[in-house]
Amino acid sequence: MQPDLLVVCNPDQIKPTHIEGPPRLAIEILSPSTHLQDRYRKMDLFARCGVQEYWVVTPFPSMVEIFELVDGGYRVWKAFARSETLKSPSFPALSIELDGVFEFPLEPDEREMLRVKEGPAEYRTLDGKVVRRR
């Protein structure tokens, strides 16, 4: 699996045909068709491979979530909104104004977040009774 973007800090990892070993940073830009794979499958694989930092970029609502590898798994380091300046735990000198990154027009139907309204949940108890949660 390949991330949308990656950063390799060790030049010895860069081979003519591939990168040997994990990148320092992997970045995924979510789309409706890949968001589950990017958030679960790739995130788990990159953590197991030792990628130190993982960014998940969501175009709408515009935000970047930064995950840091701790004890073999990712923990949320920080999330940044469109109006904020991104900072990285691995690259302290890096500073990205996200207004410029997310400077693209939204379609008229994307200007407001959609609200999903669900009915009361149903579940079964161990003895088979159906219970409705209100």
Image: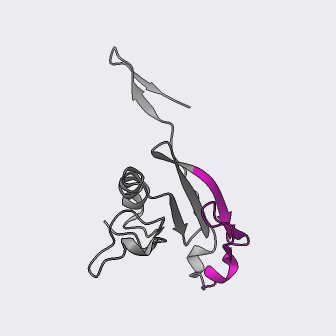
Whether the magenta-drawn stretch holds residue 93 is answered as yes
Whether the magenta-drawn stretch holds residue 40 is answered as no
Decide: is 43 above or below 60: above
Decide: is 1 above or below 68: below
Magenta region, residue range: 76-104
Classify residue 127 as left or right of residue 76. Answer: left
In percent of width and height, residue 67 lies at 55, 55
Decide: is 17 above or below 41: below
Q: Residue furthest top?
A: 127
In percent of width and height, residue 44 lies at 39, 51
Q: How many badges with numbers are in the image?
A: 0
Towards the viewer: 20 or 49: 20
Q: Quadrant of the C terminus?
A: top right
Kindly identify the residue that appears in the image at 66 percent across and 73 percent down: 94
Task: Give the colour scheme of this rendering.
Answer: one colour
Kindly identify the residue that appears in the image at 37 percent across and 19 percent down: 129
Kindly identify the residue that appears in the image at 61 percent across and 70 percent down: 62
Q: Quadrant of the N terminus?
A: bottom left
Towards the viewer: 123 or 57: 57
Kindly identify the residue that appears in the image at 67 percent across and 76 percent down: 96
Q: Quadrant of residue 66 in the image? A: bottom right
In percent of width and height, residue 75 lies at 55, 48
Towards the viewer: 115 or 53: 53
Towards the viewer: 109 or 52: 52
Classify residue 132 as left or right of residue 94. Answer: left
Q: Residue furthest front?
A: 12
